[in-house]
Image: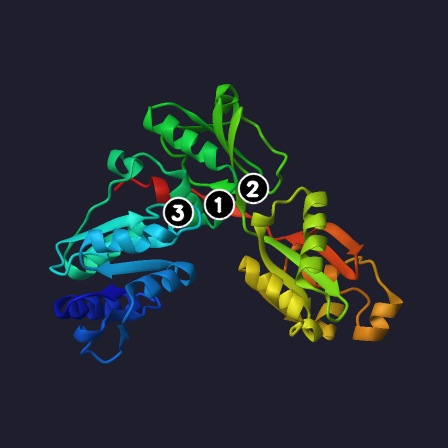
Amino acid sequence: MMAFTQRGVELAVDLAGALRRAGDEVVVCGTGAHVTHAGVRACTSLADWCSLAFARADALLFVGACGIAVRAIAPHVRDKFCDPAVVCVDEAATFAVPLLGGHVAGANDLARRVADACGAQAVVTTATDVRGVFAFDAWAAAQGVAVLDRAAAKEVSATLLAGGRVGLACDVAVDGPLPVGVVTGAEAEDCEVGVCVTLDVRRKPFARTLRLVPRVVVVGVGCRRGVDAQVIGAAVNASLDEAHVPVQAVCALATIDRKADEPGLRELAAWHGWELRTFRAERLRAVPGDFAESAFVREQVGVGNVCERAACATGAQLLLGKRSQAGVTVAIAATEPHVTFASETEEP
Protein backbone atom coordinates (compact mmCIF):
# COMPACT_ATOMS: atom_id res chain seq x y z
CA MET A 1 0.00 0.00 0.00
CA MET A 2 1.38 3.43 -0.92
CA ALA A 3 0.36 6.86 0.40
CA PHE A 4 1.69 10.31 -0.46
CA THR A 5 0.54 12.75 2.22
CA GLN A 6 0.22 12.79 5.98
CA ARG A 7 -3.55 12.36 5.73
CA GLY A 8 -3.08 9.60 3.17
CA VAL A 9 -0.67 7.75 5.45
CA GLU A 10 -3.18 7.95 8.31
CA LEU A 11 -5.91 6.45 6.11
CA ALA A 12 -3.49 3.79 4.84
CA VAL A 13 -2.68 2.74 8.41
CA ASP A 14 -6.38 2.44 9.23
CA LEU A 15 -7.08 0.43 6.07
CA ALA A 16 -4.10 -1.83 6.73
CA GLY A 17 -5.50 -2.63 10.16
CA ALA A 18 -8.87 -3.58 8.71
CA LEU A 19 -7.33 -5.73 5.98
CA ARG A 20 -5.01 -7.48 8.43
CA ARG A 21 -7.91 -8.30 10.71
CA ALA A 22 -9.47 -10.02 7.69
CA GLY A 23 -6.33 -12.11 7.28
CA ASP A 24 -4.43 -10.15 4.61
CA GLU A 25 -0.71 -9.43 4.75
CA VAL A 26 -0.22 -5.69 4.22
CA VAL A 27 2.88 -3.51 3.97
CA VAL A 28 2.29 0.24 4.26
CA CYS A 29 4.70 2.62 2.54
CA GLY A 30 4.73 6.39 2.32
CA THR A 31 6.83 9.10 0.78
CA GLY A 32 9.64 9.99 3.16
CA ALA A 33 8.54 13.40 4.45
CA HIS A 34 5.14 12.10 5.49
CA VAL A 35 6.14 8.93 7.31
CA THR A 36 5.43 9.59 10.99
CA HIS A 37 3.65 6.38 11.97
CA ALA A 38 5.42 3.35 13.39
CA GLY A 39 5.35 0.46 10.98
CA VAL A 40 5.15 2.65 7.87
CA ARG A 41 8.10 2.23 5.53
CA ALA A 42 9.68 5.27 3.95
CA CYS A 43 9.77 5.22 0.16
CA THR A 44 12.21 7.37 -1.80
CA SER A 45 11.32 6.09 -5.29
CA LEU A 46 7.74 5.39 -6.34
CA ALA A 47 9.00 3.79 -9.56
CA ASP A 48 11.22 1.32 -7.69
CA TRP A 49 8.46 0.49 -5.20
CA CYS A 50 5.92 -0.08 -7.97
CA SER A 51 8.31 -2.29 -9.95
CA LEU A 52 8.96 -4.52 -6.94
CA ALA A 53 5.34 -4.59 -5.75
CA PHE A 54 3.99 -5.32 -9.23
CA ALA A 55 6.24 -8.36 -9.51
CA ARG A 56 5.65 -9.78 -6.02
CA ALA A 57 2.33 -8.62 -4.61
CA ASP A 58 -1.18 -9.91 -5.24
CA ALA A 59 -2.56 -6.38 -5.01
CA LEU A 60 -1.40 -2.77 -4.95
CA LEU A 61 -3.46 -0.18 -3.07
CA PHE A 62 -2.75 3.51 -3.66
CA VAL A 63 -4.05 6.16 -1.29
CA GLY A 64 -4.08 9.26 -3.47
CA ALA A 65 -4.92 10.40 -6.98
CA CYS A 66 -5.76 7.87 -9.70
CA GLY A 67 -3.44 9.71 -12.09
CA ILE A 68 -0.42 9.00 -9.90
CA ALA A 69 -1.34 5.33 -9.71
CA VAL A 70 -1.93 5.03 -13.46
CA ARG A 71 1.42 6.58 -14.33
CA ALA A 72 3.21 4.42 -11.77
CA ILE A 73 1.82 1.11 -13.01
CA ALA A 74 1.79 1.90 -16.74
CA PRO A 75 5.28 0.49 -17.54
CA HIS A 76 4.41 -2.81 -15.86
CA VAL A 77 0.94 -3.63 -17.21
CA ARG A 78 1.04 -6.81 -19.31
CA ASP A 79 -2.01 -9.05 -19.18
CA LYS A 80 -5.26 -9.32 -17.24
CA PHE A 81 -4.50 -12.92 -16.40
CA CYS A 82 -1.18 -12.21 -14.70
CA ASP A 83 -1.26 -8.58 -13.53
CA PRO A 84 -2.00 -7.95 -9.83
CA ALA A 85 -5.06 -6.12 -8.61
CA VAL A 86 -4.65 -2.35 -8.44
CA VAL A 87 -7.03 -0.20 -6.42
CA CYS A 88 -6.92 3.54 -5.70
CA VAL A 89 -8.75 5.29 -2.86
CA ASP A 90 -8.68 9.05 -2.43
CA GLU A 91 -7.31 10.35 0.86
CA ALA A 92 -10.73 11.71 1.86
CA ALA A 93 -12.06 8.13 1.65
CA THR A 94 -14.79 9.09 -0.81
CA PHE A 95 -14.21 6.60 -3.63
CA ALA A 96 -12.39 3.27 -3.99
CA VAL A 97 -11.61 2.63 -7.65
CA PRO A 98 -10.38 -0.70 -9.10
CA LEU A 99 -7.96 0.27 -11.85
CA LEU A 100 -6.61 -3.10 -12.93
CA GLY A 101 -7.47 -6.78 -12.48
CA GLY A 102 -11.11 -6.25 -11.60
CA HIS A 103 -12.14 -9.89 -12.04
CA VAL A 104 -9.17 -12.24 -12.33
CA ALA A 105 -6.98 -10.50 -9.75
CA GLY A 106 -9.89 -9.54 -7.50
CA ALA A 107 -9.60 -5.76 -7.67
CA ASN A 108 -13.37 -5.26 -7.71
CA ASP A 109 -13.78 -7.25 -4.49
CA LEU A 110 -10.79 -5.47 -2.91
CA ALA A 111 -12.29 -2.09 -3.78
CA ARG A 112 -15.56 -3.11 -2.12
CA ARG A 113 -13.71 -4.29 0.99
CA VAL A 114 -11.73 -1.04 1.14
CA ALA A 115 -14.92 0.96 0.70
CA ASP A 116 -16.63 -0.95 3.52
CA ALA A 117 -13.63 -0.38 5.79
CA CYS A 118 -13.44 3.40 5.35
CA GLY A 119 -16.98 4.40 4.36
CA ALA A 120 -16.12 5.08 0.72
CA GLN A 121 -18.07 4.11 -2.40
CA ALA A 122 -16.63 1.40 -4.64
CA VAL A 123 -16.57 2.60 -8.25
CA VAL A 124 -16.80 -0.62 -10.28
CA THR A 125 -16.97 -0.18 -14.05
CA THR A 126 -16.62 -3.68 -15.53
CA ALA A 127 -19.55 -4.35 -17.85
CA THR A 128 -20.63 -7.65 -16.30
CA ASP A 129 -20.77 -6.11 -12.82
CA VAL A 130 -22.62 -3.01 -14.01
CA ARG A 131 -25.14 -5.10 -15.96
CA GLY A 132 -25.43 -7.86 -13.35
CA VAL A 133 -24.19 -10.50 -15.82
CA PHE A 134 -22.30 -13.58 -14.67
CA ALA A 135 -18.52 -13.22 -15.15
CA PHE A 136 -16.76 -16.52 -15.79
CA ASP A 137 -13.28 -15.03 -15.31
CA ALA A 138 -14.17 -13.82 -11.81
CA TRP A 139 -15.85 -17.15 -11.03
CA ALA A 140 -12.80 -19.06 -12.28
CA ALA A 141 -10.51 -17.07 -10.01
CA ALA A 142 -12.77 -17.70 -7.01
CA GLN A 143 -12.96 -21.43 -7.81
CA GLY A 144 -9.20 -21.80 -8.25
CA VAL A 145 -9.36 -22.82 -11.90
CA ALA A 146 -7.09 -21.54 -14.66
CA VAL A 147 -8.28 -19.94 -17.90
CA LEU A 148 -6.70 -21.55 -20.97
CA ASP A 149 -8.42 -19.76 -23.85
CA ARG A 150 -8.16 -16.00 -23.39
CA ALA A 151 -9.85 -15.00 -26.63
CA ALA A 152 -12.73 -17.35 -25.85
CA ALA A 153 -13.12 -15.71 -22.43
CA LYS A 154 -13.98 -12.44 -24.17
CA GLU A 155 -16.46 -14.20 -26.45
CA VAL A 156 -18.22 -15.83 -23.50
CA SER A 157 -18.61 -12.46 -21.76
CA ALA A 158 -19.74 -10.77 -24.97
CA THR A 159 -22.35 -13.47 -25.61
CA LEU A 160 -23.81 -13.18 -22.11
CA LEU A 161 -23.79 -9.37 -22.25
CA ALA A 162 -25.69 -9.56 -25.55
CA GLY A 163 -28.34 -11.74 -23.94
CA GLY A 164 -27.21 -14.91 -25.72
CA ARG A 165 -26.77 -18.42 -24.37
CA VAL A 166 -23.47 -20.01 -23.40
CA GLY A 167 -23.06 -23.78 -23.18
CA LEU A 168 -21.42 -25.53 -20.24
CA ALA A 169 -19.68 -28.91 -20.28
CA CYS A 170 -18.05 -30.18 -17.09
CA ASP A 171 -15.76 -33.18 -16.73
CA VAL A 172 -15.71 -32.54 -12.97
CA ALA A 173 -18.27 -32.51 -10.19
CA VAL A 174 -20.37 -29.34 -10.24
CA ASP A 175 -23.25 -28.14 -8.11
CA GLY A 176 -25.46 -25.13 -7.61
CA PRO A 177 -28.00 -23.53 -9.97
CA LEU A 178 -26.54 -22.38 -13.27
CA PRO A 179 -26.18 -18.64 -13.92
CA VAL A 180 -28.68 -16.91 -16.19
CA GLY A 181 -27.78 -17.54 -19.82
CA VAL A 182 -25.70 -20.65 -19.11
CA VAL A 183 -27.14 -23.96 -20.32
CA THR A 184 -25.98 -27.55 -20.23
CA GLY A 185 -26.92 -30.98 -21.60
CA ALA A 186 -29.18 -31.07 -24.65
CA GLU A 187 -29.77 -27.31 -24.44
CA ALA A 188 -26.05 -26.68 -24.89
CA GLU A 189 -25.70 -28.74 -28.08
CA ASP A 190 -26.64 -25.85 -30.34
CA CYS A 191 -24.39 -23.31 -28.60
CA GLU A 192 -21.51 -21.96 -30.67
CA VAL A 193 -19.84 -20.49 -27.60
CA GLY A 194 -19.35 -22.46 -24.42
CA VAL A 195 -17.31 -23.24 -21.34
CA CYS A 196 -15.67 -26.57 -20.55
CA VAL A 197 -14.29 -27.34 -17.08
CA THR A 198 -11.75 -30.08 -17.72
CA LEU A 199 -8.25 -31.44 -17.15
CA ASP A 200 -7.97 -32.57 -20.78
CA VAL A 201 -6.47 -30.08 -23.22
CA ARG A 202 -8.04 -31.99 -26.13
CA ARG A 203 -11.60 -31.21 -25.04
CA LYS A 204 -13.40 -28.72 -27.27
CA PRO A 205 -17.14 -29.41 -27.12
CA PHE A 206 -18.11 -26.04 -28.65
CA ALA A 207 -16.96 -24.25 -31.80
CA ARG A 208 -15.52 -21.55 -29.54
CA THR A 209 -14.66 -23.16 -26.22
CA LEU A 210 -13.40 -21.49 -23.07
CA ARG A 211 -11.53 -24.22 -21.20
CA LEU A 212 -11.22 -23.81 -17.45
CA VAL A 213 -8.73 -26.08 -15.72
CA PRO A 214 -8.93 -26.94 -11.99
CA ARG A 215 -5.55 -26.69 -10.25
CA VAL A 216 -5.66 -30.17 -8.73
CA VAL A 217 -2.74 -31.97 -10.39
CA VAL A 218 0.25 -33.16 -8.38
CA VAL A 219 3.46 -34.12 -10.17
CA GLY A 220 5.53 -36.75 -8.39
CA VAL A 221 9.25 -36.46 -9.14
CA GLY A 222 12.35 -38.48 -8.44
CA CYS A 223 15.78 -37.39 -9.68
CA ARG A 224 19.51 -37.79 -9.38
CA ARG A 225 21.42 -35.27 -7.30
CA GLY A 226 22.28 -32.05 -9.10
CA VAL A 227 19.86 -32.37 -12.00
CA ASP A 228 19.17 -28.95 -13.50
CA ALA A 229 15.72 -27.36 -13.17
CA GLN A 230 15.38 -27.19 -16.96
CA VAL A 231 16.00 -30.92 -17.26
CA ILE A 232 13.40 -31.66 -14.58
CA GLY A 233 11.00 -29.24 -16.24
CA ALA A 234 11.41 -30.92 -19.61
CA ALA A 235 10.64 -34.32 -18.08
CA VAL A 236 7.58 -32.92 -16.29
CA ASN A 237 6.31 -31.26 -19.47
CA ALA A 238 6.77 -34.47 -21.46
CA SER A 239 4.65 -36.42 -18.97
CA LEU A 240 1.99 -33.71 -18.83
CA ASP A 241 1.82 -33.74 -22.64
CA GLU A 242 1.45 -37.52 -22.67
CA ALA A 243 -1.36 -37.29 -20.10
CA HIS A 244 -2.99 -34.42 -22.09
CA VAL A 245 -2.91 -32.30 -18.93
CA PRO A 246 -2.06 -28.58 -19.19
CA VAL A 247 0.70 -27.22 -16.99
CA GLN A 248 -1.81 -24.72 -15.60
CA ALA A 249 -3.55 -27.62 -13.80
CA VAL A 250 -0.50 -28.34 -11.63
CA CYS A 251 -0.59 -27.15 -8.03
CA ALA A 252 2.36 -29.02 -6.50
CA LEU A 253 5.46 -31.13 -6.92
CA ALA A 254 5.89 -34.12 -4.59
CA THR A 255 9.01 -36.09 -3.75
CA ILE A 256 10.93 -37.82 -0.96
CA ASP A 257 12.20 -35.67 1.91
CA ARG A 258 15.80 -36.41 0.94
CA LYS A 259 15.22 -34.24 -2.12
CA ALA A 260 13.76 -31.29 -0.18
CA ASP A 261 16.93 -29.26 -0.70
CA GLU A 262 17.46 -30.27 -4.32
CA PRO A 263 18.14 -26.95 -6.15
CA GLY A 264 16.58 -28.05 -9.44
CA LEU A 265 13.31 -29.07 -7.79
CA ARG A 266 13.15 -25.95 -5.65
CA GLU A 267 13.87 -23.69 -8.60
CA LEU A 268 11.23 -25.35 -10.79
CA ALA A 269 8.59 -25.14 -8.05
CA ALA A 270 9.41 -21.49 -7.34
CA TRP A 271 9.33 -20.59 -11.04
CA HIS A 272 5.79 -21.92 -11.44
CA GLY A 273 4.56 -20.98 -7.97
CA TRP A 274 3.99 -24.64 -7.10
CA GLU A 275 4.11 -26.06 -3.61
CA LEU A 276 6.96 -28.52 -3.03
CA ARG A 277 5.69 -31.35 -0.84
CA THR A 278 8.08 -33.93 0.61
CA PHE A 279 7.51 -37.22 2.44
CA ARG A 280 9.65 -39.53 4.53
CA ALA A 281 10.46 -42.95 3.08
CA GLU A 282 8.29 -44.76 5.61
CA ARG A 283 5.32 -42.59 4.64
CA LEU A 284 5.87 -43.38 0.97
CA ARG A 285 6.14 -47.11 1.68
CA ALA A 286 2.75 -46.95 3.43
CA VAL A 287 0.92 -45.53 0.38
CA PRO A 288 -1.43 -48.25 -0.93
CA GLY A 289 -1.34 -49.16 -4.60
CA ASP A 290 0.48 -51.07 -7.31
CA PHE A 291 3.62 -49.11 -8.24
CA ALA A 292 6.58 -49.61 -10.57
CA GLU A 293 9.19 -50.66 -8.02
CA SER A 294 12.97 -50.51 -8.43
CA ALA A 295 15.33 -52.50 -6.22
CA PHE A 296 18.11 -50.00 -6.93
CA VAL A 297 15.98 -47.04 -5.83
CA ARG A 298 14.91 -48.97 -2.72
CA GLU A 299 18.54 -49.55 -1.82
CA GLN A 300 19.39 -45.88 -2.31
CA VAL A 301 16.49 -44.10 -0.58
CA GLY A 302 14.54 -46.77 1.32
CA VAL A 303 11.54 -47.01 -0.98
CA GLY A 304 11.25 -48.68 -4.37
CA ASN A 305 9.31 -45.90 -6.11
CA VAL A 306 9.45 -42.18 -5.39
CA CYS A 307 7.49 -40.38 -8.09
CA GLU A 308 4.28 -42.44 -8.07
CA ARG A 309 4.17 -42.90 -4.31
CA ALA A 310 4.93 -39.24 -3.61
CA ALA A 311 2.17 -38.07 -5.97
CA CYS A 312 -0.34 -40.43 -4.35
CA ALA A 313 0.82 -39.59 -0.81
CA THR A 314 -0.94 -36.23 -1.29
CA GLY A 315 -4.28 -38.03 -1.64
CA ALA A 316 -4.27 -37.78 -5.43
CA GLN A 317 -5.02 -40.61 -7.85
CA LEU A 318 -2.61 -41.58 -10.63
CA LEU A 319 -3.37 -40.31 -14.12
CA LEU A 320 -0.04 -41.34 -15.63
CA GLY A 321 2.43 -43.76 -14.11
CA LYS A 322 6.19 -43.54 -13.86
CA ARG A 323 8.04 -42.10 -16.85
CA SER A 324 11.83 -41.75 -17.00
CA GLN A 325 13.86 -39.12 -18.85
CA ALA A 326 17.44 -37.87 -18.40
CA GLY A 327 17.78 -39.06 -14.82
CA VAL A 328 14.32 -37.85 -13.80
CA THR A 329 11.24 -39.94 -13.03
CA VAL A 330 7.79 -38.38 -13.21
CA ALA A 331 4.23 -39.46 -12.37
CA ILE A 332 1.05 -37.42 -12.80
CA ALA A 333 -1.81 -37.59 -10.28
CA ALA A 334 -4.87 -35.49 -9.47
CA THR A 335 -7.29 -34.98 -6.62
CA GLU A 336 -11.02 -35.04 -7.37
CA PRO A 337 -11.95 -31.58 -8.66
CA HIS A 338 -15.19 -29.86 -7.72
CA VAL A 339 -16.72 -26.52 -8.67
CA THR A 340 -19.88 -24.79 -7.54
CA PHE A 341 -22.14 -22.03 -8.72
CA ALA A 342 -24.13 -21.90 -5.48
CA SER A 343 -22.70 -18.69 -4.04
CA GLU A 344 -22.64 -16.99 -7.45
CA THR A 345 -26.32 -17.33 -8.27
CA GLU A 346 -28.07 -16.81 -4.95
CA GLU A 347 -30.70 -14.12 -4.98
CA PRO A 348 -29.86 -11.05 -2.91
Three-letter residue code for mark 3: Val
Badge 1: residue crowd in 10 Å (few <14, some 14–19, many ≥20): some
* Camera-nearest label, 3 or 2: 3
Residue 37 position in % (x across, y down): 20, 78
Three-letter residue code for mark 2: Val
Indicate the quadrant where residue 119 lies: bottom left
Q: Please give left or right for residue 280 compared with residue 140 in the image.
A: right
* Quadrant position of the N terminus in the picture: bottom left
Q: CA distance from mark 1 to mark 2?
A: 7 Å
Q: How many marks?
A: 3
Q: CA distance from mark 1 to mark 3?
A: 17 Å
Q: Could you tell me which secondary element the residue under label 3 belongs to?
A: loop
- Looking at this view, name the residue that lies furthest to the right: 295
Residue that carries the numbered disc 3 in the rendered image: 104
Q: CA distance from mark 3 to mark 2?
A: 21 Å
* Quadrant position of the C terminus in the picture: top left
Residue that carries the numbered disc 1 in the rendered image: 339
Three-letter residue code for mark 1: Val
Residue that carries the numbered disc 2 in the rendered image: 172
C-beta proximity under 8 Å, tags 1 and 2: yes
Residue 58 position in % (x across, y down): 39, 59
What colour scheme does the image use? rainbow
C-beta proximity under 8 Å, tags 3 and 2: no
Q: Is residue 128 above or below residue 51?
A: above
Badge 2: residue crowd in 10 Å (few <14, some 14–19, many ≥20): some
